[in-house]
Amino acid sequence: MSAMDGAAGGEVSGQIGRLVVVGIGLIGGSLALGLKAASGCREIIGVARRQQTCDQAVGLGVVDRAVTDIAQVLPELEAGDVIFVAVPTLTVEAVFTQLKDNLPAGVTVTDGASVKGSVVAAAQNVWGEAPEFLVPGHPIAGSEQSGVTAARDDLYIAHRIILTPLENTAPAHIQRIQRMWQAVGAEVLSMPVVEHDEVLAATSHLPHVIAFGLVDTLAHDAENENIFRYAAGGFRDFTRIASSDPVMWRDIMLANRDAILKSIDLYTSNLGSLRSAIASGDSEHLMGVFTRAKAARDHFTKMLAKKAYTETMEAKEVTFIAQPGGAVNGDLRVPGDKSMSHRSIMLGSLADGVTEVEGFLEGEDALATLQSFRDMGVVIEGPVNGRVTIHGVGMHGLQAPPGPLYVGNSGTSMRLLAGLLAGQQFDTVLTGDESLSKRPMNRVANPLREMGAVVETGEEGRPPLKIRGGNALKAIDYTLLMASAQVKSCVLLAGLYADGETSTTEPAPTRDHTERMLSGFGYDVRRDGPRASLQGGGKLAACHIDVPADISSATFFMVAASIAPGSDVLLQHVGINPTRDGAINILRAMGADITLQNTREVGGEPVADIRVRYAPLKGIKIPEDQVPLAIDEFPAIFVAASCAEGETVLTGAEELRVKESDRIQAMADGLKILGVDAEPTPDGIVIQGKGASDQSAVFGGGEVDSLGDHRIAMSFAVAALRAGADIRIKHCANVATSFPNFAELARGAGMNLEVC
């Protein structure tokens, strides 16, 4: 029976039987050794052109036996076996020709070639179409060493393997190859053939071209002996790949010619621009190139996960173990205000001149905004210890980004950027992580459409957002359907580019950082109660911004000090904007001992040092007019309510259900696990406080799930101050989005918190 007549994909099952490695070098030999170490198959057979290589592979224990002709072993193969073709790219077709009409049914064929288009073309040349049993693949691992002696069993551990199956590839064959690579410790991803070859041309093939070319150039230099003798580590590290197998790389260059030429042309153009900048002394151009490159390299892993491979990568797993008891004391400075950090980057980028920012929050959300503007051509230095220098490009100086703008978990970035990008001349796509991709975006898309913007969303109005450039915006008078600073800010920022006066009217007060900061940049914003308005067509002037500490972050320690006997903390330089002080007002109403010291104004924002000492709390009905002023702080307030005496009732907070998680349900579920009576309602929660005694445990121990929501995670960490046993909090990686040094600061203040 010919291979094309083989068993249907659904009949293929079970673990790998035999592995046949065609080409026993670094790549094939390392897979063989890795599977041996993992007991991932019952026998490994090597195929090599020379008997000497076969003998060497057997002698080194790389394979169990080896032959020089694959025809010798094909008759004994059976369903469940795998053939791994690990020969130079242009030799793959010759191997496929040997397999045609001789391959037993149910055998899976895969390969390790760096160019997938040529593998698919080879299969089509041999079989007429790529057969269902072929699973093209590419291990992203290697070494400048080659040959069977370079093989090692740990080569693929924690490395990525890209599979490029076709539409007709049988799922069971794909699953078999996935299991094979996972057995040797690799992470398996999938992507289309064409995209794979374009990505690898830029990230692997072009660097090899440059390394080979540089070393060859220097080798022709009459002074090359001294050049090589005195070259530093950077030269050694960069040119290491020029020691790679010349035959393999010759084949790759020829097989992926078009994509590699495209990458070379782009690099040549950029190198020419860099040369011109050096020649002309263009300091700003050089700083732009170097800062963008440094940021890209520093975030290389994230770029691979979200851009290069288009595969959703799981975030690093972080678990908090909060041990019971303790108190919080000392003078603390929590990170800078996230809302202001976002806006400082946005408005500083659009201003004329250089904006200096101090106190910038170096969390992932704010950094996502910063990276987005770097991607749009803005030169941004830093952040270094909270200091950022922004070289503004003016209202119309942004450039089209090279690809989608990825904003991670930041709803603020996506919604505010949507307003700014609606007025640009270029198209943009805004994407985010799995959590953000579930959040509603029509609340900003709809008013932007009323202004004449062309905005497309995903299913049910969720990300990604696709914004068509070049549309003239018209001013609108927009009444918000719900109290939302993000929606208000989006409309006002779009209004900067609209013809006429744009205004917003909100049903309840929300944070007004956008209005205040626009005024700080010299843009006239008129405010009349719930109404804010501005005229389009103005300019922003660069300024100095001192970002105060974030009251949302400070709230965790305000609650901690309020519930833990013996606590006394001073929270320094905290923003107390009257549209953000709901947490202070609510905690005071519950009986918290909170005093404001050294009240002052910094850059148009009210700031104070907040002293909080332990005091018994009582349950209250939270006034609805305070809800918009504390919308992000409620998870921590729920912990305070659990420690209060009596019932606390929250209403009018349906917005909490569409944050990074459904915060009402998530907190209710966690509080119940810890022994607190917490009943969620459609727009709030009812909590029966247990704070009858200062010393009694309010919470039991247990495991709670933060659902990847940073505020949920930190709130339950605070709860451990009044717990009777350890609280284990899952999925805490996103704490880095808003409070990157939370665990360190909490331990320094007296909390018993472990991170694992």
Image (tube, rainbow, N blue to C red):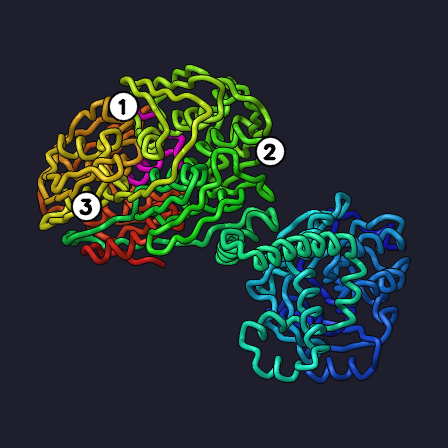
Tag 2: amino acid: Asp
**Is 354 positioned to the left or the right of 41 in the image?**
left
Near-viewer residue (715 or 358): 358
In percent of width and height, residue 276 lies at 61, 56
Give the spatial CA distance, label 2 vs label 1: 41 Å
Label 1 sits on residue: 651
Question: Of residues 634 and 726, which is closer to you in this image?
Answer: 634
Q: Which range of residues does the magenta coloring cover?
A: 651-672
Task: Please tell me whether residue 211 is drawn above or below residue 549 in the rendered image.
Answer: below
Contact (CB < 8 A) between labels 3 and 1?
Answer: no
Q: Nearer the viewer, mark 3 or mark 2?
A: 2
Q: Is residue 235 left or right of residue 175?
A: left
* Location of residue 335 in the rendering, given as x and y in whole percent from the top left corner: 29, 48
Kind of residue at disc 3: Ala
Residue 390 visible, this orientation: yes
Q: Crowding at label 1, few (<14), some or many (≥20) Cα neighbours within 10 Å?
A: some
Q: Nearer the viewer, residue 224 or 192?
A: 224
Q: State the residue at coordinates (86%, 54%).
A: 3
State the quadrant of the N terminus: bottom right
Pointer 3: what residue?
560
Task: Residue at 50%, 51% (x, y): give it.
Answer: 284
Find residue 392 and report its horizontal and vertical position in percent. 45, 42
